[in-house]
Image: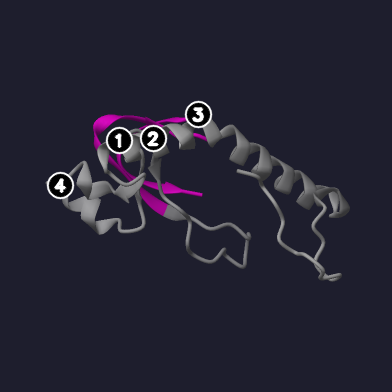
Amino acid sequence: PICRAHAWRQDFLERRVWKYPTYYASVMAESIHIRYSLLPFLYTEARRSFDTGVAMLYPTYYDYPYDSEAYAFKTEGFLGPNCLIAPVTIPVSQGNLVAAKQVYLPGDSEWIEWSSLTALKSGIHERV
């Protein structure tokens, strides 16, 4: 898999990351780095999906069918058996340009937030 900008033959769309202002270029470069660092994990999950017939991305209630919160948090799911994802799909606040979202961590174990390596207990958390 190649990360490619598809702004072909459109002069008003810049494809080169380094042509953007420094802040945006650094965010874009970090995103590309994260994408490529996840490839071994994604390939492993793709193979697991092929071998088991279970989709790579599936709802939380597949693993926690008796947990009502697993059904209530509809935008969350698992990417493989060990990675819970909860995409932020709400607009940012106009006051501070940050979007806050409640995230449900199922079960009764400890979870690690990937970006900060913060340990979180199961339950509902307000995340930014």
Measured from the top left, where is residue 101 in percent x and y? 44, 55
Q: Is residue 116 visible?
A: no
Closer to the camera in the image, 8 or 107: 8
Which comes sooner in the sequence, label 4 or label 3?
Answer: 4
Q: Which residue is mark 4?
A: 65
Disc 4 residue type?
Answer: Pro
Disc 1 residue type?
Answer: Asp
Spatial CA span between label 4 and label 1: 23 Å
Colour scheme: one colour
Q: Are marks 2 and 1 in contact (CB under 8 Å)?
A: yes
Disc 3 residue type?
Answer: Leu
Quarter of image, res 7: bottom right
Specify the segment rendered in magenta: 102-128
Q: Secondary structure at mark 3?
A: loop
Query: In the rendered image, which quarter contains the N terminus?
Result: top right
Q: Is residue 72 visible?
A: yes
Q: Secondary structure at mark 2?
A: helix
Which residue lies at the image location 47% right of the left edge and 30% below the top edge? 118
Quarter of image, res 95: bottom right
Q: Nearer the viewer, mark 1 or mark 3?
A: 1
Which comes sooner in the sequence, label 4 or label 1?
Answer: 1
Measured from the top left, where is residue 16 in percent x and y? 82, 53
Closer to the camera in the image, 83 or 89: 83
Mark 2 crowd level (few <14, some 14–19, many ≥20, 10 Å Cα): few
Which residue lies at the image location 26% right of the left edge and 37% below the top edge? 52
Q: Which residue is mark 3?
A: 117
Q: Nearer the viewer, mark 3 or mark 2?
A: 2
